[in-house]
Image: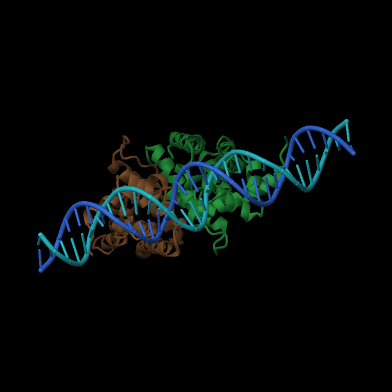
Chain colours: A brown, B green, C cyan, D blue
Amino acid sequence: MTKNRYRRDELLEIAIDLFAEKGYVGTSIRDIAKAIDRSVSNVYHYFENKEELWLAILEYSVQGLPEKLRTVAHSEGEPLERFRKLLKLHLEESTKHQRETKIFFIDEERLSPKGKTINKRIQKEILDIYVEQFRLLQSHNLVRTKNLKILAFNVLATINWFLRWYDPHGDMSKEEIYDEIIGFVLHGMCK
Amino acid sequence: MTKNRYRRDELLEIAIDLFAEKGYVGTSIRDIAKAIDRSVSNVYHYFENKEELWLAILEYSVQGLPEKLRTVAHSEGEPLERFRKLLKLHLEESTKHQRETKIFFIDEERLSPKGKTINKRIQKEILDIYVEQFRLLQSHNLVRTKNLKILAFNVLATINWFLRWYDPHGDMSKEEIYDEIIGFVLHGMCK
DNA sequence: GAGAAATTAGATCGATTGTTCTAGAAGGGT
DNA sequence: ACCCTTCTAGAACAATCGATCTAATTTCTC
């Protein structure tokens, strides 16, 4: 009845690697099993099917992100400073789960209705957090534009795109990049 | 010897649709043939294999983008105004070839070395155009930050992410969205 | 230590993949 | 009429896919 959590998580880890590298459709159950030197049945013992494995990865990593962001979003303090903290946390969490977050976006369309729904729900939750923040900042007359949804898309664009080009082994430090991105979001490119 | 250009392009069109919808790995040659009511051999008559079909799509659409952008980038006029034109053109071209440009980014990692190289070359060309523009704007003391590469990533982020959420049948006009994005790139979210 | 449950490997399933082969139909040039 | 290239369809190929089945082994519980 009770499944071996450790062996299960090992499978999750290797699956995340492969999914991130070769995509959902591009990664077979055999690939995953072979990569960790197990049998195919072993994978199926821990996960009902391929899609459930995918969903487990989401639960394992991205699922909790909205809640974490909300904690900061609803914390005390100055609105703009709180928003800055929100961006920072979002960037940190995305970096921490870079592989999974990448997966989260890339193969969205290849999932079953169930998986797609969960995917979209999480993304919607995050979007709403930002729109809510913008509304608050707007009431303090701090926001430049009127269309808050497009603004949220643009902010999320920079954060999520960052996952595509960021190389942990690169020569720029995380903090350096974070500040650059936060600066861009807040003030754009112009002086 | 001479292949029927029209029939070939019909195949390209349907392939773009399917690739954009279900991805490179998720779309089979049979899917493509069936969608246009031809035989599998017909597809192979016009394209050597699946990857060549993919590359033909790139040539058909995205390949010419860097050249078009360069034309504007090297045109006369005020630096900032020219940059604004560059953004506008980039957005327009991306919208015009929304499906292909989406393909261009999504399945990058699933290609052969040859395909990956071409993909990366085009992206690098575009990145360089932007970095060059930033350098010029910087010399006019118009740029806020020092790290031009990250800046370029962030600008490209908003443009490319836009393709993910933009819905041609939505209630916002293109021009409206373009202006919003250009404004965000130039001045960020803050007043 | 017996028995039940959890875990594993390996063979196997039908379906689908990219690709090739064979061969016939259509088309244009002479 | 003829031939030669272009185009087309359909069967077939080996490989791989997600998933299942059977059966053996390990681990836990009493």
Q: Is residue B132 left or right of residue A15?
A: right
User: Residue D9: image x %, image y %?
Assistant: 69, 51
Q: Is residue A23 left or right of residue A78?
A: right
Residue at 67% x, 45% y: name it. B8
Q: Please determine whether, in this image, residue B42 is positioned above or below residue A112.
A: above
Q: Which of B34 and B130 is in front in this view?
A: B34
The answer to whether residue A186 shows anywhere in this view is: no
Tell me where residue A149 sits by quadrant.
bottom left
Q: Disc count in the image?
A: 0
Residue at 46% x, 36% y: name it. B131
Tell me where residue B143 sits by quadrant.
top left
User: Residue B49: image x %, image y %?
Assistant: 58, 40
User: Residue A169: image x %, image y %?
Assistant: 31, 37
Q: In which quarter of the image is the N terminus of chain B?
A: top right
Q: Which of B31 and B167 is in front in this view?
A: B31
Q: In which quarter of the image is the C terminus of chain B?
A: bottom left
The answer to whether residue B23 shows anywhere in this view is: yes
User: Residue A159: image x %, image y %?
Assistant: 37, 50
Q: Is residue B70 left or right of residue B137?
A: right
Q: Please determine whether, in this image, residue B1 is positioned above or below residue B158.
A: above
